Image (spheres, rainbow, N blue to C red):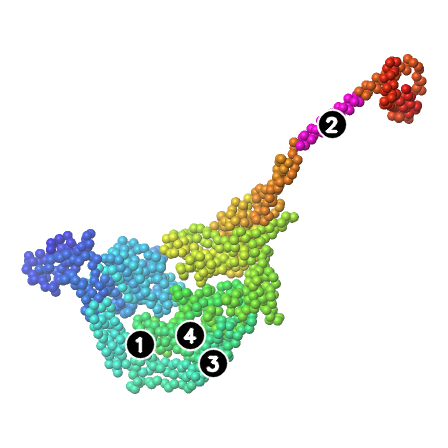
């Protein structure tokens, strides 16, 4: 195999140079395998490396093996194996040792392991830049089985650097009991650049007192610098609990060149082990043991995982504890004493105490309220809907009342079914199978444990809370923020630095320290109020001292809890009943219901039906006040549970009435508002769902905890976290890019659960519509406002939330229309409490009436005329009456009337002309005859003269007119005239009449 000097590290070149100089001065001895060890060079760009021999003492010998080509850089052995460098092959670990193969583990903390360092700094500086807080003594401290952090305000970093040849992982166990300290874990590369890491992976969660959690983070190939950093700002003088760290394991190293020996108290019995096992109780082992050695159990003992045996001491009061036996079939109990297990003391030796005798048999304490006993020995919970004070049988609640649900534990003969007790120690598992607390008749007290620094744990689980329906209108605001409360009475008696912790864990998330008490505390009561409806575990943890110790100095230090009361527990029992309002459905209420739509008459205690169009107020328990009238244009359901719009509305102004039918809009509307973005760039929307009319409530669902809920199921109210209301809002994260088959819907809130009414006015019951948010271009049809209100009060909305949906007639929109929010309030609200929506639709126009169209008359053609009906423009109505059909009526055209007029005109003209000609000829003839007559009279005789030609005074001119009477000649007269023509005489008889004289007649 060829030799390539470029693969030598610098220190190898120096060593070879010194060897050459030494050899020139004095010939050294030949090197043996004990004079050197093998190492690999750094990997080159091709992923190859060389194995070289490194002497323990440079120049002490000669003849080192030459470099040979090594394994590939990514080569590693399996768990329980190591890389034997001479043969460059994987070899099994011997018994008494272990290997992780491509990983390393740190689980022994008697001293700080090589490669770990602890660095402390202060973040509090004065104005001159000098440290006000001395952090020289603030370090991570090895405690044998774990590391313990600092307890002050110094920022302390535990650092470890590792170089990985391939992607790996780091995992560790930690205990983080006190949120007053900050605890973060992050990773940097060799350029001091922090690796990409989510906040969940960086900031660790608080753990339950005494419980370990495991945290795992993926590591990239190359250099990884691991940081465990603590720090905080402490208020007051209260000492905080440190953070504990153990079992650090790193995967991804290229190879392990040796196996790790088992630490004392552990062993590995077979070759090729990947871990060591703890020695069982009453046995021990030294470092690198393949088996454990038993103790002389007659005089010695050893706990599990011990490195040596200890002498058994004489028994004393610290080695036994007192218990109360469970009730027997005769209802009797007694006090007994038991040795603490495992028993390590000796009886029958000098100075040893014996176990005290058992006490007398006494009657058992009564059952706790809400329980009953049938055999005098065991207590059972009352069935749902019944109650008991613990001494009597269970009775059903009367009509119109509900059970007072909760827990009330004040007698401690046995541990209640929803309570658990355990013992836990940070550094060992000695007390894992012990009871942390023991019942004692009228109280429950901390148990003995195995050592003074054990955590003695008592836990009660509450699956949720349920508000009673018996909430008066005056107390509604208080009940909105208080879902329940836990009250307990306790005391502590201590000679050391004992401490009692009270903690809470909601929805199985991180545990929160609620309160703690140190040293001796007089008997007192503590109450904690729950402001959220969640599944909660309450925990009491008692620790006699927080100093690691296997000895028992404070066994008589004790904590006692006398009573625990939890109100409104959803699975609680009842000790009594109270009058309740009946506004909720029987399925969601524990009330013994009246028939739907009835209230309880306070005078007769009878169920009475509510009047029509009223709804039952769930906050009112008794009397007709429970029946509230529905608002304008609304009606109630048959069960009077709520009021709603039936999609019809009528508005009258003057003599004009507008009738609206909103059925075309649909009973439900939705609006997706957004998008918006979080600080991390995640896109989300706000979805509003509105129940307009018909009585069907809108549904908003939170499917974050159940991604199997589809959009169709969400629309129908599927899922456990569905909110049903008239107006609700959800935060929607779209499915695109999230890897889910459906969108995420979360943070669903109730914006309005009560319908107030419909009106064209801009206010109703104190809620303003604010017309300026939606300017209108036309006022021919008024906007119709739907008003809603929520009965839920929040810290930001003391009067509750409200919503106004403004319906606007817009013929250009579809019947379903379009929902929008104000431009200046893009979230639908300007103050977070009052929400405003505009719903423009052709379906929001009034129904059509005859005044919405007019008639057009057609031209008369062919003696027929068409009548047409058209809508007034713009058409601002929908539905209602239809346009009348086109009509055709008979008529006379204009040609007929023209012809008729022409004919009548012509006839009249001809008649007038004929009469004119006739009278003209007649006049001429008369003139002629008169002329002849005058001429004839002058020739033949004298005519008598008139007395006067003037008109006398007082006489009418008409009366004075002479009347000429013309008598048409008869046929005989005409013949005579013809005959007389021969004689030259031709005349006719003319009679002249006068008012003053007689007529003169010539013949």
Drawn side of residue 196 relative to residue 605, left or right? left
Q: Earlier in the sequence, mark 3 or mark 2?
A: 3
Q: What is the number of the mark on residue 374?
A: 3
Q: Main secondary structure of the magenta part?
A: helix
Res 335 → quadrant: bottom left
Say if mark 2 contacts mark 1, CB within 8 Å. no
Above or below for 584 versus 973: below
Residue in front for this viewpoint, 693 or 671 = 693
Q: What is the number of the mark on residue 908?
A: 2
Say if mark 1 contacts mark 4, CB within 8 Å. no
Task: Please give the name of the residue rendered at 38% of the width and 64% of the height, measured from the top-left corner.
Answer: 510
Above or below for 131 versus 484: above
User: Could you tell me how far apart the alpha carbons at marks 3 and 1 are, in whole angstroms?
Assistant: 46 Å
Task: Please give the name of the residue rendered at 23% of the width and 65% of the height, measured from the top-left corner.
Answer: 79
Q: Nearer the viewer, mark 3 or mark 1?
A: 3
Is label 4 in a helix, a strand or a loop? loop
User: Could you tell me how far apart the alpha carbons at marks 1 and 4 are, in whole angstroms?
Assistant: 34 Å
How packed is label 1: few (under 14 Cα within 10 Å), some, or many (20 or more)?
A: few
How packed is label 3: few (under 14 Cα within 10 Å), some, or many (20 or more)?
A: few
Residues in magenta, as a range:
896-920
Which residue is denoted by mark 1 in the rendering?
551
């Amino acid at each position: 195999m060829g030799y390539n000097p470029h693969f030598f590290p610098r220190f190898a070149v120096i060593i070879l140079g010194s060897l050459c100089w030494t050899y020139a001065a004095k010939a050294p001895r030949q090197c043996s395998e004990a004079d050197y060890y093998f190492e690999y060079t750094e990997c080159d760009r091709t992923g190859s490396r060389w194995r070289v021999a490194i002497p323990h003492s440079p120049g002490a010998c000669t003849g080192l093996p030459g470099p040979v080509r090594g394994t590939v850089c990514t080569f590693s052995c399996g768990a329980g194996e190591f890389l034997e460098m001479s043969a460059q092959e994987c070899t099994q670990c011997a018994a008494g040792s272990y290997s992780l193969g491509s990983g390393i583990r740190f689980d022994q903390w008697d001293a700080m392991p090589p490669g770990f360092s602890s660095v402390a700094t202060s973040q509090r500086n004065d104005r001159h830049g000098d440290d006000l807080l001395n952090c020289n003594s603030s370090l991570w401290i090895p405690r044998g089985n774990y590391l313990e952090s600092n307890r002050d305000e110094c920022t302390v970093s535990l650092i470890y650097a590792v170089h990985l040849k391939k992607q790996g992982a780091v995992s560790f166990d930690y205990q983080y009991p006190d949120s007053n300290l900050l605890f973060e874990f992050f990773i940097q590369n060799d350029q001091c650049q922090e690796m990409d890491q989510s906040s969940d992976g960086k900031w660790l969660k608080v753990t339950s007192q005494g419980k370990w959690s495991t945290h795992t983070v993926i590591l990239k190939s190359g250099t990884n610098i691991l940081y465990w950093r603590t720090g905080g700002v402490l208020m007051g003088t209260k000492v905080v609990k440190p953070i504990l760290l153990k079992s650090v394991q790193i995967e991804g190293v290229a190879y392990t060149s040796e196996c790790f020996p088992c630490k004392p108290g552990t062993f590995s019995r077979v070759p090729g082990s990947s871990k060591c096992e703890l020695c069982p109780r009453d046995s021990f082992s030294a470092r690198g043991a393949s088996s454990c050695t038993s103790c002389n159990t007659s005089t010695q003992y050893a706990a599990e995982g011990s490195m040596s045996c200890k002498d058994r001491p004489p028994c004393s009061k610290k080695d036994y504890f007192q218990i109360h036996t469970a009730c027997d079939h005769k209802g009797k109990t007694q006090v007994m004493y038991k040795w603490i297990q495992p028993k390590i003391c000796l009886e029958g030796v000098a100075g040893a105490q014996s176990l005290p005798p058992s006490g007398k048999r006494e009657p058992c304490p009564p059952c706790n309220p809400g329980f009953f006993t049938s055999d005098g020995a065991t207590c059972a919970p009352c069935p749902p809907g019944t109650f008991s004070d613990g001494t009597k049988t269970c009775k059903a609640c009367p009509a119109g009342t509900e059970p007072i649900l909760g827990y009330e534990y004040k007698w401690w003969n046995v541990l209640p079914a929803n309570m658990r007790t355990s013992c836990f120690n940070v550094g060992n598992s000695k007390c894992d199978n012990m009871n942390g607390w023991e019942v004692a008749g009228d109280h429950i007290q901390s148990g003995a444990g195995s050592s003074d620094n054990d955590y003695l744990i008592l836990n009660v689980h509450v699956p949720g809370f349920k508000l009673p329906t018996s909430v008066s209108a005056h107390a509604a605001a208080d009940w909105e923020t208080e879902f329940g409360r836990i009250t307990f009475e306790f005391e502590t008696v201590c000679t050391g630095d004992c401490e009692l912790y009270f903690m809470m864990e909601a929805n199985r998330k991180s545990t929160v320290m609620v309160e703690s008490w140190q040293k001796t505390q007089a008997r007192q009561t503590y109450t904690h109020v729950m402001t959220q409806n969640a599944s909660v575990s309450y925990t009491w943890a008692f620790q006699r001292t927080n100093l690691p110790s296997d000895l028992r100095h404070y066994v008589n230090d004790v904590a006692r809890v006398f009573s625990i009361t939890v109100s409104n527990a959803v699975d609680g029992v009842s000790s009594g009943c109270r009058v309740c309002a009946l506004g909720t459905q029987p399925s969601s209420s524990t009330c013994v219901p009246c028939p739907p739509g009835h209230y309880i008459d306070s005078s007769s205690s009878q169920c009475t039906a509510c009047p029509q169009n009223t709804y039952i107020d769930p906050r009112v328990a008794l009397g007709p006040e429970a029946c509230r009238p529905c608002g304008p244009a609304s009606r109630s359901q048959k069960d009077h549970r709520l009021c709603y719009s039936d999609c019809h509305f009528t508005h009258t102004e003057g003599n004009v009435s507008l009738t609206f039918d909103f059925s075309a809009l649909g009973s439900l509307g939705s609006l997706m508002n957004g998008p918006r973005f979080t600080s991390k760039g995640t896109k989300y929307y706000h979805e509003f769902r509105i129940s307009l009319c018909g009585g069907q409530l809108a549904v908003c669902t939170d499917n974050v905890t159940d991604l199997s809920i589809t959009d169709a199921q969400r629309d129908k109210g599927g899922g456990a976290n569905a909110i049903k209301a008239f107006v609700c809002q959800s935060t929607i994260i779209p499915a695109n890019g999230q890897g889910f088959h459906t969108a995420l819907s979360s943070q669903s809130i109730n914006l309005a659960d009560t319908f107030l009414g419909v009106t064209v006015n801009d206010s109703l019951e104190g809620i303003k519509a604010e017309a300026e948010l939606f300017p209108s271009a036309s006022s021919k049809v008024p906007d119709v406002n739907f008003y809603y209100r929520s009965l839920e009060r929040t810290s930001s909305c003391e009067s509750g939330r409200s919503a106004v949906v403004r319906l606007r007639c817009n013929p250009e929109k579809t019947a379903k229309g379009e929902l929008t929010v104000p431009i200046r309030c893009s979230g639908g609200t300007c103050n977070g409490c009052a929400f405003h929506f505009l719903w423009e639709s052709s379906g929001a126009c009034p129904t059509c009436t005859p005044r919405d169209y007019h008639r057009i008359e057609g031209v008369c053609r062919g003696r027929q005329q068409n009548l047409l009906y058209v809508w007034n423009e713009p058409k601002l109505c929908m539905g209602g009456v239809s346009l009348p059909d086109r009509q055709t009526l008979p008529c006379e055209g204009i040609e007929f009337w023209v012809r008729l007029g022409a004919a009548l005109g012509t006839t009249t003209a001809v008649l007038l002309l004929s009469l004119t000609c006739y009278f003209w000829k007649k006049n001429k003839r008369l003139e002629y005859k008169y002329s002849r007559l005058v001429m004839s009279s002058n020739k033949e005789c004298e005519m008598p003269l008139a007395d006067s030609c003037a008109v006398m005074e007082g006489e009418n001119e008409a009366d004075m007119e002479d009347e000429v009477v013309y008598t048409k000649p008869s046929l005989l007269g005409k013949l005579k005239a013809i005959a007389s023509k021969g004689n030259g005489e031709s005349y006719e008889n003319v009679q002249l009449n006068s008012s003053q004289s007689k007529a003169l007649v010539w013949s």
